[in-house]
Image: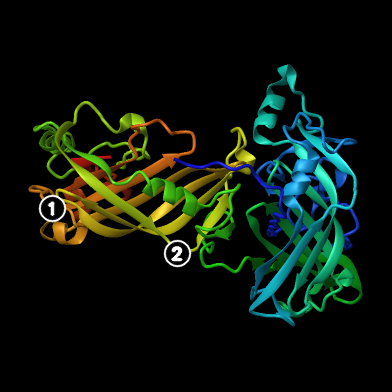
Amino acid sequence: MLKWGSVDRVTWTTIVLGALLSGCAGGQTGDGEPFGPIGDDPLVGPGVFGDPGNDDGDDGPTRGEEGSGCHYETEVVVDLEAPSDVGFSPQAAIDATTGAFETTFAWQSSEQFEIGPETGTSALTLTISYRGGEVRVRRPAPPPNNNDEGGNFRAEIERHCPGGYEIDVELGLKTEGGAFDETLDATLVASSETVATIRQPIDHEALNGTFDVLATKPEGGVVKQVHINATVSPLGTYGSIDGVLEYRTPDDGNGTGGAVSDVAVGGGGLIGAWPASDACTSDYGSPGIPVTAETDIGGETLADVLAGIHEAFPRPLTWQVPPASSASSASSASSASSGADGDTDFDPDADPEPDPLEASDLSQPEYEDVGETTLELAIQTDSEGCARRFEGFGEADAGDRWDVAMPVELSARTDDGTWNGTYPGELEAVLGRDGVTRVTVRVRKEDVAIDAFEATTGISGIDLTGYDSGGFHLWVERRADDDTPGTDLGRLEIQGADVADCVDNPPEPIRDDNGDVVGAPGCRGTDYITVRRGVF
């Protein structure tokens, strides 16, 4: 059973710096409106980032508080303690997203420029301080000149673009070697009680640190701005800093060269990012914050949650099998529908893997109980995981949600001796405003040779005759709102793989009358058929 704790108002600070390009003609200091009229940026085209300089609060390209076509109306807040129609008070957001902390900054090499004097990895100190600046509530609104008859567009905007607050704060950024040593005014945009963002450009001439671009490709580039893009949360911080270059084209007006014209060409790239963490390095997905099993999450830790799961063991496990004809009929049916070579018109969106564990689907009527034993199970981890902000919208408290992925090791043993193994797996956790709302541990093994199945999986007594290979899927899950006595906690699905012949021997492509390839016959692929399962 999960234990809950309220979010302590501690110095939780997270800053995310994203790759943003703004206008190169004329610098923007940290004291001005963020970015100026980026909506007409000559580098990125009209309206890509909205127009943050026009008090609509639009400040970036992803999710509501970072843009994605969102527009806002703002109103100055007088009482910071009073909740508004956005669902939380400004003071709650200030308490959760201001403070000071330390992280690591990875300086990035770039094809566009060579930077100095710091390189490699540096310690980075970030501070966000509220010193009584103006606070504005912001509400999603249709774009200017939009004819929203019936209010349908406004309703859709409100679902996709979260409201919140704009809070004038002081931002500090300092790297270990002094390349950045900045203190400037900025706007903290809180789209939820526990998550906020900052996007701020700084003129290169206004930098207090020693950061500089030593060379550019092509030569002749001049650094105009660095851009800070930050997201703050009680979990910590992640972010990046980008540089904007300006190139001016020599031209005397008749194409022969001469005086320097006002024609500018922009460029730039990533200067660096934080935190420098292997756990959050990915070629896809959003940036993340490193976490461990001991990271405090709303008054509890993932180690606390795992301890609660361990308390449920040992517990009964019921072995189940499909009806005697089920497995064989499933295989023969797929062959009959697809032909001898396995070709078929199949649904490419179909998911051969069962849905994530739900108590309601653990005891399906078509399965027969064939035995009961006692299961002992343990989940261990000393690895670093990564928390990434949930990028969905339209859900209650979606802006406060983080999804965690963390490597684990799971050991399982049954008293009847049929299951005894230790496996690498992954813990998936959902973190909300008040702590951990769901934890799922998954182990998946596929393509195990039939003659090596028992030795590889530690599961004995499984008849996989007629299948091409074997494997299993294992889920263990607990939800914070699920403390019903007797609720099933997990499931082991042991499966045989029926591989269509067309997987290893693709049929000839379909050709038109001229012999040109116009398509390919369908192939059903591989069917995974459950031959036994254990419910616990």
Above/below status of 299 relative to 104: above
**Picture coordinates of residue 154, whole percent (x, y):** 72, 26
Judged by depth in the image, the label closer to the viewer, 1 or 2, is 2
Q: Nearer the viewer, residue 501 or 466?
A: 466
Name the quarter where the C terminus is drawn.
top left
Residue for point 37% across, 55% down? 379
**Picture coordinates of residue 67, whole percent (x, y):** 71, 44
**Picture coordinates of residue 361, whole percent (x, y):** 31, 31
- Label 2 is placed on what type of residue? Asp
Residue for point 10% across, 59% down? 451
- Label 1 is placed on what type of residue? Ser
User: Horizontal placement of 328 versus 484: left or right?
Assistant: left
Tell me the tag on residue 375.
none
Above/below status of 279 relative to 216: above
In the picture, residue 457 is in which quadrant?
Answer: bottom left
In the picture, residue 363 is in which quadrant?
Answer: top left
**Picture coordinates of residue 161, whole percent (x, y):** 69, 36
Q: Secondary structure at mark 2?
A: loop
Instruction: Work out whether residue 343 can be spotted.
Output: no
Q: Residues within 10 Å of mark 1 (few under 14, many from 20)?
A: few
User: Furthest residue to the top?
Assistant: 150
Above/below status of 240 relative to 113: above
Q: Which residue is mark 2?
A: 382
Give the alpha-carbon distance from disc 1 to disc 2, as whole Å.
Answer: 30 Å
Tell me the tag on residue 460.
1
Name the quarter where the N terminus is drawn.
top left
Q: How is the image coloured?
A: rainbow
Q: Nearer the viewer, residue 31 or 252?
A: 31
User: Horizontal placement of 438 versus 298: left or right?
Assistant: left
Instruction: Work out whether residue 248 can be spotted.
Output: yes
